[in-house]
Image (tube, rainbow, N blue to C red):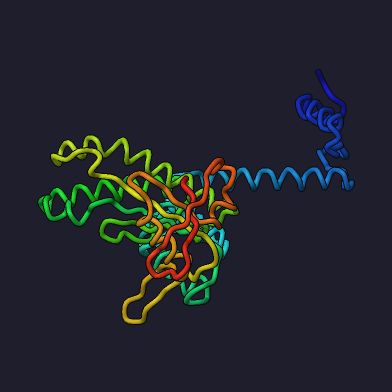
C-alpha cells in the first residue's frame, strides 16, 4: 500500500506503534525523530540502565565471567578473561587468576598498582576448612597417596568457593583459606561463605567415599571441619622480599581456630556471621568454645 512522501509501510507501522506506546517517536520530513519530552527521556534512560545491568550480568555469570569481576568492581576496568578479546592480554601475562577464575592476575599480582595502596581495610568474611587426622594419615600413606588426597580436597573446596564468588586465597597443607567480599564485592558475603561451606561439605561427602576406597581407608577417616568469621580485616600485599597477597587480622585468626572446635563434617560460625546470615542458620544455638590464642571463650554456632 503506497504511503505519501515515499515512506515505507513498515516504518510507518513502527512509528504508529511507537506513538501508541508513548515512546515519543514521530515522523517529520519523512524521517523518524524522537520527541524531546521529559517522559520519553526518562523512559529511554531507564531502558538503557536495564540493558547495562543485563549486559553486566551476562559478562559476569557464575563460573565463566567474560571480564575480570574484580577489576570491573574496583577500578572499573573491563579486562577480558575469555574469548578473542582476551588474546592480547594473555600475551602480556594477564589471564584468569588461580585464586578465582573470574578474577585476573592483575588483581593477584598488581594489587599495589591497582588499589594505589599496599593494603586496604575492608569488611569481609574468612573461611577455613581443614582435614581431620591429616598428620596421622600422612604418616601411614605414601607420598603419592597424600598428593592425591590433597588434590581432591583442594579441588572440591575450590569449586564450591568459586561458585559463591569467594577467593581461594591459600592452601596450607591440610587446610584452605578463602576470603569473601574482596576483590569480588557482595553485601551478602557472610551468607555466601556459609553456603560455600555447605557446598564444600556436600562435594567432599560425595568424593571421599571413592577416594577412601582407593586409599584403603574408611570414609569416616576423611572428615573435615570448617570455621567462618567476618568483620574488618587488612587485605593486601605483605612482605618486602617475598610479597604475599592475603588477609590478616583478628577475623582471620578466629576463623583459622574455629575448625579445631568443629567435629568431623561440622561447620562452625561466629556470632558476627550468625547475625548476618541468620536466615540461613535458623534453629542454631550458640556454644562457648575456648579457642587457642583467645583469652575469652568464643561463641560458635553450628551451620
How many marks the image carries: the answer is 0
* Vertical order, 199 against 300 (above or below): above
Single out the residue that lies furthest toward the top. 1
Front-lying residue, 1 or 10: 10
State whether residue 121 is above or below residue 276.
Answer: below
Is residue 98 visible to the viewer in this orientation of the structure?
Answer: no
Q: Position of residue 70 (x, y in %)?
A: 50, 59
6 relative to 283 in the view: left or right: right
Q: Residue, x 42% and y 48% (percent of image)?
A: 267
Which residue is at 86% across, 35% downward?
A: 22
Residue sitting at x 47%, y 74%: 112
Is the N terminus in the top left, top right, bottom left or bottom right quadrant?
top right
246 with respect to 211 (left or right): right
Identify whether 182 is placed above or below 156.
below
In which quadrant of the rendered view does residue 237 lie? Answer: bottom left
Residue 152 pos. (x, y %) = 26, 46
- Residue closer to the observer: 132 or 51: 132
Q: Locate residue 272, reporting x and y percent.
A: 55, 57
Q: Position of residue 117 (x, y in %)?
A: 51, 77
Decide which of 85, 259 is in the foreground and name it: 259
State which quadrant residue 136 falls in.
bottom left
Q: Quadrant of residue 289?
A: bottom left
Which residue is outermost to the bottom? Answer: 240
Residue 242 is at least partly visible in this image: yes
Q: Is residue 157 left or right of residue 57?
A: left
Amino acid at each position: 500500500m503506497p504511503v505519501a512522501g515515499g515512506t515505507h509501510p513498515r516504518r510507518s507501522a513502527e512509528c504508529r506503534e511507537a506513538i501508541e506506546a508513548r515512546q515519543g517517536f514521530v515522523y517529520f520530513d519523512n524521517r523518524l525523530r524522537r520527541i524531546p519530552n521529559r517522559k520519553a527521556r526518562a523512559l529511554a534512560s531507564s531502558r538503557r540502565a536495564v540493558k547495562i545491568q543485563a549486559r553486566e550480568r551476562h559478562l559476569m555469570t557464575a563460573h565463566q565471567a567474560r571480564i575480570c569481576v574484580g577489576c570491573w568492581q574496583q577500578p572499573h576496568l573491563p579486562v577480558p578473561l575469555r574469548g578473542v578479546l582476551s588474546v592480547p592480554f594473555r600475551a602480556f601475562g594477564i589471564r584468569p587468576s588461580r585464586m578465582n577464575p573470574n578474577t585476573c592476575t592483575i588483581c593477584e599480582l598488581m594489587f599495589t598498582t591497582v588499589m594505589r595502596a599496599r593494603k586496604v581495610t575492608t569488611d569481609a568474611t574468612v573461611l577455613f576448612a581443614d582435614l581431620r587426622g591429616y598428620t596421622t594419615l600422612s604418616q601411614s600413606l605414601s607420598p603419592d597417596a597424600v598428593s592425591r588426597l590433597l588434590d581432591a580436597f583442594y579441588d572440591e573446596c575450590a569449586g564450591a568457593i568459586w561458585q559463591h564468588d569467594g577467593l581461594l586465597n591459600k592452601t596450607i597443607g591440610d587446610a584452605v583459606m578463602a576470603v569473601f567480599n574482596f576483590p569480588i564485592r557482595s553485601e551478602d558475603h557472610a551468607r555466601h561463605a556459609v553456603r560455600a561451606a555447605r557446598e564444600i561439605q556436600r562435594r567432599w561427602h560425595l568424593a571421599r567415599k571413592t577416594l577412601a576406597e582407593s586409599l584403603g581407608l574408611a570414609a569416616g577417616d576423611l572428615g573435615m571441619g570448617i570455621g567462618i568469621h567476618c568483620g574488618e580485616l587488612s587485605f593486601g600485599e605483605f612482605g618486602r622480599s617475598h610479597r604475599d597477597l592475603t588477609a590478616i587480622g583478628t577475623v582471620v585468626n578466629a576463623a583459622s581456630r574455629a575448625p579445631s572446635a568443629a567435629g568431623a563434617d561440622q561447620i562452625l560460625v561466629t556470632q558476627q556471621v550468625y547475625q548476618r546470615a541468620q536466615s540461613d542458620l535458623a534453629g542454631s544455638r550458640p556454644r562457648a568454645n575456648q579457642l587457642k590464642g583467645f583469652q575469652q571463650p568464643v561463641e560458635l554456632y553450628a551451620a
